[in-house]
């Protein structure tokens, strides 16, 4: 896992609902925790594009429902700034479900675009992605 060059606004706090954009069987995730996120006392941990989270599956196939799975945030509605000064935002918040904590995606097809920051940080996710913005 590489560091992110962009100044990404962490727009998805813990307990936020995020839809999935892959064919893993999960449809709706609830963020439980953010991996590697340290905050001050009393602040709710939040995730942004490229962050790995642990999420509970709220809607989806019966086998995967009510389980805690690792996921990566690939899109967020809140705009964030790239090093060249441009700002980018997406139409929805979306995540990709992982097989393991190493970053291998469970699904084989991703619907919609994937942020460039995710592709740089997670090469296994970039291989599956059809569109990188």
Image (spheres, rainbow, N blue to C red):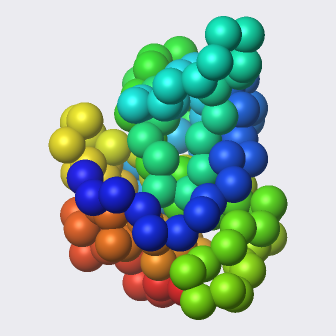
User: Measured from the top left, where is residue 46 in percent x and y?
Assistant: 65, 34
User: Measured from the top left, where is residue 68 in percent x and y?
Assistant: 45, 20
User: Measured from the top left, where is residue 66 in percent x and y?
Assistant: 53, 16
Residue situated in front as seen by the camera: 59 or 16 = 16
Query: Which residue is rendered at x = 50% and y = 25% of the image?
Result: 38
Q: Is residue 30 left or right of residue 132?
A: right
The answer to whether one can see residue 114 in this image is: no
Q: Is residue 59 above or below residue 119?
A: above
The answer to whether one can see residue 24 in this image is: yes
Query: Which residue is rendered at x = 44% and y = 69% of the image?
Result: 5
Count of marks, rendered view:
0
Q: Is residue 17 above or below residue 15?
A: below
Query: Which residue is rendered at x = 60% and y = 78% of the image?
Result: 82
Q: Quadrant of the C terminus?
A: bottom right
Q: Residue furthest front?
A: 40
Q: Is residue 44 above or below residue 41?
A: below
């Amino acid at each position: 896992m590489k560091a992110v060059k962009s100044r990404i606004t962490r727009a998805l706090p813990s307990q936020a609902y995020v839809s999935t954009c892959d064919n893993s069987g999960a449809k709706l995730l609830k963020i439980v925790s953010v991996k590697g996120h340290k905050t001050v006392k009393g602040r709710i941990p939040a995730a942004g594009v490229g962050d790995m989270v642990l999420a509970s599956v709220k809607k989806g196939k019966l086998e995967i429902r009510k389980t805690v799975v690792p996921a990566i945030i690939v899109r967020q509605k809140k705009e964030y700034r790239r090093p060249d000064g441009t700002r980018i935002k997406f139409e929805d918040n979306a995540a990709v479900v992982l097989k393991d904590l190493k970053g291998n995606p469970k699904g084989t097809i991703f619907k919609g675009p994937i942020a460039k920051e995710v592709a740089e940080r997670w090469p296994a996710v970039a291989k599956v992605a059809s569109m990188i913005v």
